[in-house]
Amino acid sequence: MITSAKGPLDGLKVISCSTAQAGTVPYSLMADLGAHVIKIEVPGSGDSNRTQSQDPGYPSSFFETNNRGVKSLTLNLKDPRGLAVLHKLVADADVFGQNFRPGAAEKNGFGYDDLKKINPQLIYASISGYGPDGPHADLPGTDAMGQALGGIAEAYSTPGQALRTGIVSVADETCAILTFGGILAALHSLRTTGLGQKVETSLLGGQIRLMGWTLTTNMWRNQNPVTGQVRIAGTADRPSMSANFSDGQGKPFVFQLNGTKWQAAMTALGFYKELQNAGFADLGVVVTSEERRASMLTTLDGCFARGDRDRWVEILRAADIVAAPVNSMLEASNDPDVLANGYVTEIEHPEYGKTLKVHGSPWKFSETPVQIGIAPKLGENTDDVLAGLGYSAAEIQGLREGGVV
């Protein structure tokens, strides 16, 4: 869905020396919102992720998702002439981003101290694995490392089984979204103070923030959370529960409620008398007794197995209880609310000659619509970018022949 209206970040110039996922998604989001994003890639080979997760007849799902809407400029930053081009780009840029291994940007002439001399108002975003301080600050990081250290593995764990990281890159994506927000915060500060600054985020820091109030509760109690089928919060006199169940065909769903709605919800489902007779008239038992909690969940498992998921969700929603089917990824991509809000959309890809389902936008702006683009070919915008910096056609050809671009 491409519109002619300008996005809310129109006029913003961003230079990205970034790869992988956490390092590219912030700038792809900015491109969605109208920013002019120039991605720096190695001449000849480009971003190593260009062919990751590529099926025959399709672009790389990894590269396309994480780099859509940006411009590609090939530049050899190890050549002084290439570094000079980067410095020219930075001179009038608003944002510069990099996620090189800690120390590499500084070693190669585009660390924060180098670039702020050229542009004191620059917002410089730096992403690392472990954060800028601490015993492992100089180590590289990946999504799996962020998930492993940050606590997310416990969020979906099963009691009695080993913790394991998940298939979705939640550490990368969380860090990327926080970096996006941090850059916008720094831009607001620039507007009010006139000062550019460095914004540092990390995969580990993003995961810790993602754990939210649950982590706070665990720290205050100094004990691990209840995991598995049910999520428990509150106290015996003010309990709340989020739990997963399956219907007779094994289709999973979830509902969440507090103690004040327990009787009404179970009555609407037709379960209350059975639960009352089993000693579960009050939801507080989920907090006070692990044994009673397990027994209550077993009873509910049997109740829900007698019917259909869609019917149970319909009844609970009618009783003003939050309930929803547990979607697989493919089910989520076809969910009616997802489609109606444009969270998943379709694009026509000119190179591959087919309609592709892609991420839409999580935002809806009343006056500045989001524009969904595609990822660039390697070096597609090199000549235009260099010409915009004042290089002649002959100079550009010389840089190309010298392996600079």
Image (tube, helix red, strand yellow):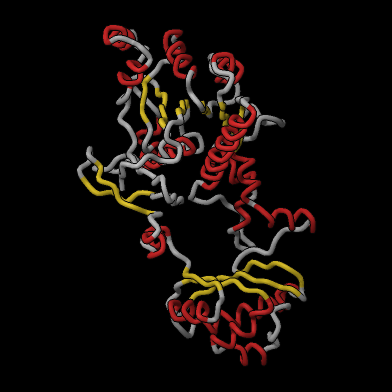
Quadrant showing the C terminus: top left
Looking at the image, residue 333 lies above or below residue 191: below
Q: Residue furthest right?
A: 221
Q: Nearer the viewer, residue 190 or 385?
A: 190
Taking 395 as reference, is 324 left or right? right
Q: Position of residue 311 (x, y in %)?
A: 44, 81
Q: Nearer the viewer, residue 49 or 73?
A: 73
Q: Position of residue 206 (x, y in %)?
A: 61, 43
* Residue at the (44%, 18%) spot, across then down: 89
User: Is residue 330 something that shows in the picture?
Assistant: no
Looking at the image, residue 35 lies above or below residue 380: below
Looking at the image, residue 314 lies above or below residue 396: below
* Residue at the (65%, 46%) spot, across then down: 208
Q: Position of residue 167 (x, y in %)?
A: 48, 50
Q: Count of labels shown?
A: 0
Taking 17 as reference, is 175 left or right? right
Taking 116 as reference, is 395 left or right? left
* Residue at the (57%, 22%) spot, across then down: 121
Examine the image and state in which quarter residue 310 appears: bottom left
Examine the image and state in which quarter residue 117 appears: top right
Looking at the image, residue 376 lies above or below residue 275: above
Q: Position of residue 19 (x, y in %)?
A: 46, 31
User: Is residue 386 something that shows in the picture?
Assistant: yes
* Residue at the (77%, 74%) spot, across then down: 236
Q: Nearer the viewer, residue 53 or 74?
A: 74
Q: Residue furthest left?
A: 353
